[in-house]
């Protein structure tokens, strides 16, 4: 395999990727006087257009994406993103709108935001939504800021936020950033919140319980109504991390089972691209009691016209420039409307079915620490392979790459040692699920018969196994030409 | 395996008391489960700690975990060697991989901690 050089390494002094016509008017150097100009950008790569194109095309071919195959990262919901959504978002009427255009000129765009708030409210059972947050973690932060604003309006913001040990890792950070102290609630043997444990921890100093439902074990919190009652009885609020809404959309509504505030990840449940293909979007839904605190501006409908309402004195303020990631919201709206109510429900049902199909296919081959029924994802561990052959979840994940699949989420949730958290989503056909199950079974056989092949995996990639420990201990995050 | 003069918490910190000061670290079991430690965040000298208060975080290739204070007191020294060599926690968790030294405020909380033999029994319970 040929190593792709860094773009700096193919740089030649004086080479350019552009040509500018000769100046045909009198030169006027004074036009730039007083501006902070510099003669040179140090170490700027000097390459031709075709070299840039080839370099980045070759890098892109070394990458893996959901358009190439199954991408079972648990809790990430790496579903296929239908191309029609991108096509709609690229229409000039949407893509070329200026965010500072006056409301009268962008009525259609405002209508989209307004209708999307209504659609998300209908799917989740809330009274209002803000579409501003840029991604899930910001949605969480905004949600907890709303909780704080609510309690402050009652007198005191309270002191604690309760978070189960099966929650998403960003939950404690969001609570902490909002000035709360975090108290952890231990899961019971079935991987759920124990109402008796919660009852003990719930005091009038607790601002909210942050629950992920289904939680990161892929387990539905079946006591959720009782949990909401316990929290509400002490004047607390119930926050739900909606990252796993792909298991519930069209089937159950968090607003109906006692949740007061929730964030969604449009880039998970509602099929907009993740990561480098993003950006994300983390809308926050609230019940009436929290509506006055929502970020400004709010898109308000007055008669037949849409306007931006900034006159909301209790608002926590603006949390994002302009209107959030508008085109991402639009792509998600296209997805929801193309599926329709029945389609959204079917999406969740097949996501749950697919996860359980994988579970049945691998039960007994890989250890299942919690045998509670799975929703949209299933969490196995490396326990069987580790105890018998010294094979860890890292070896299994690396070998899976050789089989043409992206590895699942590893070592999370923390309550399962050596976790392999698999979420196939509704995207995968039975044929692809069978191929994945067969690959995982082959790896389990290799663990017994030829563990070395797993320890050295991956074998068929551009680069072999990387030293992740050295990379974390001594990260080199910038190219330094003087050292090269 | 576990030093007889140490006491242990359920969260896998150890504490070694010497007069009115105590040395704190994480157990061999904890370092094994964390995997390769890549970064350690330590509190400032002079920080006052309550029992079970977060004293810092340990980042491994697998996860970021909090370390809790096994006793009440004031931080008098932190192991500055961990900044450049976090792997010391993996190599020698009960010795040179210590995390901080504290001046004990009171000894009340110490009695609730486990002796080495009790901690080993506790670990057996966790394995099953």
Image (cartoon, rainbow, N blue to C red):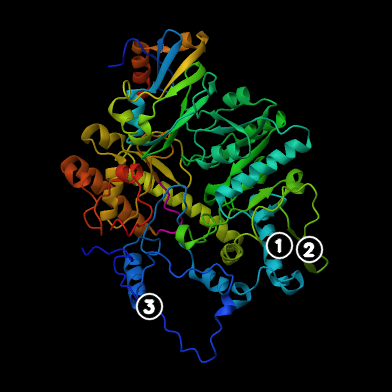
* Residue sitting nearer the eye, A308 or A400: A308
Crowdedness near tag 3: few (<14), some (14–19) or many (≥20) residues, C-alpha within 10 Å: few
Name the residue beneath numbered marker 2: A301
Looking at the rendered image, the quarter that the N terminus of chain B falls into is top left
Residue nearer the viewer, B74 or A204: B74
Q: Which of marks 2 and 1 is nearer the N terminus?
A: 1
Q: Which residue is drawn at 32% across and 60% down?
A: A481
- Determine which of the numbered discs, if any, sits on residue A16 in the image: 3
Stretch in magenta: A422-428
Residue on which the image places disc 1: A114
Drawn side of residue A181 relative to residue B123, left or right: right
Q: Of all residues shown, which one is farthest toward the bottom?
A: A24
Tell me whether the residue at label 1 lies in contact with that at label 3, contact meaning CB atoms closer than 8 angstroms.
no
- Nearer the viewer's eye, disc 2 or disc 3? 3
**Residue A78 lies in what quarter of the image?**
bottom left
Q: Where is residue A389 in the image (x, y as percent from the top left)?
A: 21, 35
């Amino acid at each position: 395999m040929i190593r792709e050089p860094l773009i700096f390494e193919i740089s030649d002094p004086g080479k350019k990727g552009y040509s500018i016509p000769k100046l045909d008017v009198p030169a006027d150097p004074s036009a730039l006087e007083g501006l902070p100009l510099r003669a040179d950008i140090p170490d700027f790569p000097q390459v031709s257009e075709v070299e840039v194109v080839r370099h980045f095309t070759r890098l892109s071919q070394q990458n893996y994406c959901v358009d190439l195959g199954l991408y079972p990262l648990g809790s990430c919901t790496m579903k296929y993103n239908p191309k029609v959504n991108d096509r709609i978002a690229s229409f000039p009427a949407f893509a070329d709108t200026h965010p500072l255009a006056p409301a009268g000129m962008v009525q259609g765009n405002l209508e989209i935001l307004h209708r999307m708030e209504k659609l998300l409210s209908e799917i989740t059972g809330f009274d209002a939504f803000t579409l501003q947050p840029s991604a899930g973690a910001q949605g969480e932060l905004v949600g907890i800021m709303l909780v704080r604003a609510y309690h402050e309006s009652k007198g005191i913001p309270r002191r604690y936020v309760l978070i189960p040990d099966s929650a998403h890792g960003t939950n404690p950070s969001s609570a902490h950033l909002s000035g709360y102290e975090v108290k952890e609630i231990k899961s019971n043997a079935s991987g759920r919140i124990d109402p008796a444990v919660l009852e003990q921890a719930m005091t009038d100093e607790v601002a909210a319980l942050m629950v992920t439902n289904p939680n990161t074990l892929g387990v539905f919190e079946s006591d959720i109504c009782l949990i909401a009652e316990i929290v509400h009885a002490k004047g607390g609020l119930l926050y739900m991390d909606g990252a796993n809404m792909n298991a519930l959309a069209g089937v159950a509504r968090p607003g109906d089972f006692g949740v007061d505030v929730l964030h969604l990840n449009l880039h998970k449940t509602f099929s907009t691209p993740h990561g480098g293909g993003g950006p994300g979007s983390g809308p926050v839904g609230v019940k009436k009691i929290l509506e006055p605190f929502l970020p400004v501006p709010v898109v308000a409908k007055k008669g037949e016209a849409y306007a931006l309402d900034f006159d909301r004195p209790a608002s926590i303020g603006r949390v994002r420039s302009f209107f959030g990631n508008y085109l991402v919201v639009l792509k998600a709206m296209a997805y929801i409307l193309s599926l329709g109510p029945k389609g959204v429900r079917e999406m969740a049902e097949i996501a749950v079915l697919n996860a359980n199909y994988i579970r049945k296919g691998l039960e007994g081959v890989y250890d299942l620490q919690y045998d509670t029924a799975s929703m949209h994802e299933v969490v196995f561990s490396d326990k069987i392979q580790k105890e018998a052959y010294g094979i860890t979840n890292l070896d299994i994940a690396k070998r899976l790459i050789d089989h043409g699949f992206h590895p699942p989420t590893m070592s999370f949730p923390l309550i399962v040692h050596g976790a392999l958290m698999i979420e196939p989503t509704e995207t995968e056909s039975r044929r692809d699920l069978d191929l994945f199950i067969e690959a995982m079974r082959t790896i389990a056989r290799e663990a017994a018969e030829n563990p070395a092949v797993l320890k050295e995996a991956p074998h068929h990639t551009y680069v072999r196994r990387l030293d992740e420990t050295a990379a974390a201990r001594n990260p080199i995050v910038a190219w330094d030409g003087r050292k090269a | 395996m576990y030093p007889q003069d140490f006491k242990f918490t359920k969260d896998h910190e150890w504490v070694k008391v010497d007069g009115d000061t105590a040395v704190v670290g994480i157990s061999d079991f904890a370092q094994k489960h964390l995997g390769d430690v890549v970064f350690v965040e330590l509190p400032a000298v002079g920080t006052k700690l309550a029992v079970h208060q977060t004293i810092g975080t340990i980042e491994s290739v697998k996860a970021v975990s909090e370390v809790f204070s096994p006793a009440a007191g004031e931080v008098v020294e932190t192991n500055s060697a961990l900044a450049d060599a976090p792997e010391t926690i993996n190599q020698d968790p009960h010795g040179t991989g210590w995390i901080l030294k504290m001046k004990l405020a009171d000894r009340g909380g110490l009695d609730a901690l486990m002796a080495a033999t009790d901690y080993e029994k506790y670990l057996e319970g966790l394995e099953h």
